[in-house]
Amino acid sequence: MTTTTATTFDASHAVQRVVAASRRVQQPQSSGDLVSLAMGEPDFDTPAQVVDAAAAALRAGRTHYSPLYGEPTLRAALAERIGRLANRSVDVGDVLVTHGGTGGLTAAILAIVDPGDRVVIPDPTYSLYADLISLAGGIVVPVPLGPDLHWDLDALDAALVDAKLFVFCNPGNPTGIVHSRAELERLGAALEGTDTIVLSDEAYADLTFTGEPFTSALEVASLVDRTVYCQTFSKSYAMTGWRVGYLWGPSAIIAAAARIHNTANGSMNTAVQDAALVALETCDEDIARMHEAYARRRSLMADGLTAIPGLDVSSPEGAFYLFPRYDLDLPSVELVGRLRELGVAVRPGAEFGAAGEHHLRLSYAASDDAIIAGVARLASGFEALR
Ligand SMILES: Cc1ncc(COP(=O)(O)O)c(C=O)c1O
């Protein structure tokens, strides 16, 4: 008889696939005099009225299970918001409240992708996508971005032939790029006549600095009917720890995603959803206030980086990231380790895809002081390593 012990245990094939595919790098604990420009989350506190709403909900006994698709009042408000974007009446039944953007992406990808399905992603992009596609047994097809970090539309056209799904974020993590209406329309045209589904992760939609209004995939007629829209409260409302997001899309896909979400997550936190509704209804000024601060910090960081020899700074269009290319002959993981020893934490470009190599991801969701000090350390670090 064989017994399974910790020493004989092999993780499931699903886990092994994720481990084999994953490029995600666990950040070491910060210690000592380290300036961090590595964070992927707002450094602002959640607006006070949202915190108050959660506390009031808990005190009012909102401590029980919530319906599996989410609280009806929140879903109705989300359906209205999505309807305004898509310029159509949206059925509340097609809105699924999820455990953050992560829960929405997981539910959508596991609901859509079968083993062997080809799933196209930009390279580099948010590293969770490849992990989730691998979890589902799909084949990750990374398509390198152009030198300006926008999509290489010809390469994308070729890769999308027979693809089950295309997953992307707009604005982009790690690139800080905002894909324009023209790019989205070009994508819609390329997919015409195919069954390829699009998963549009618009986590940073409120954070654009192009001077042009942001275009959601839901606003593009040739995309909307094939698009699963994934959104989160994490970035716009500085609510990363609350874990609330949502999906909307074609009814059959949302029903399938709900099946996964209900199986893996069960029902969502009731008081958190009450607070999310308050965020949706009352935070316009907070979003504007944070946007103003990010805009200032973005210039501060971009100006500082542009002055460093050997760094080619990407155009900072959205999210809160810059993704400069560097000319040192060092892999990005190694360079990040060296820079850390010199007192500044950033993320290696290779973490986001093979084509992200020789780039660094810097976040300006940090204080002005941290940006000034971090950029100064980066400048002296590059000088020392040259
Ligand atoms: C592009 C993108 N999508 C989704 C997420 C996940 O967000 P959430 O905190 O809602 O799970 C992140 C987090 O960094 C992200 O960068």
Image (cartoon, rainbow, N blue to C red):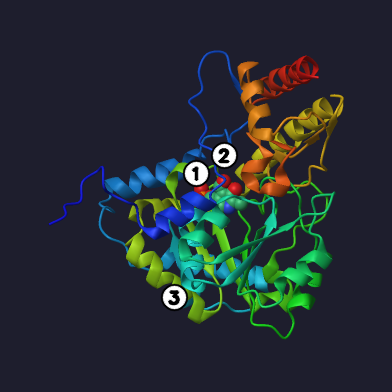
Work out how far the residue at label 2 is from the one at label 1, CA to CA, in angstroms.
7 Å
Which residue position is annotated with label 2? 41
Assess whether mark 3 and mark 1 are in contact (beta carbons under 8 angstroms): no
Assess whether mark 1 and mark 2 are in contact (beta carbons under 8 angstroms): yes
Label 2 sits on a secondary structure element that is: loop
Which residue position is annotated with label 3? 256
Which residue ends up furthest to the left in the rendered image? 1
Which residue ends up furthest to the front in the rendered image? 1
| Residue occupying image coordinates x 76% and y 50% | 177
* Residue 367 spot, x, y in % from top left: 64, 26
| Residue type, label 2 | Glu
Q: Quadrant of the N terminus?
A: bottom left
| Residue type, label 3 | Ala
- Of 200 and 23, nearer the camera is 23
Compared with 66, 374 (above or below) is above
- Of 313 and 367, nearer the camera is 313
Which residue ends up furthest to the bottom in the rendered image? 193
Work out how far the residue at label 1 is from the one at label 3, CA to CA, in angstroms.
26 Å
On the image, which quarter does residue 315 sit in? Answer: top right
Does label 2 or label 3 sit earlier along the sequence?
Answer: 2
* Residue 111 spot, x, y in % from top left: 47, 71
Asked if residue 22 lies left or right of residue 364, the reply is: left
Ligand 1 near label 3 (Cβ, under 8 Å)? no
- Of 49 and 38, nearer the camera is 38
| Residue occupying image coordinates x 51% and y 73% | 112
Compared with 161, 27 (above or below) is above
Which residue position is annotated with label 1? 240
* Residue 8 spot, x, y in % from top left: 26, 47
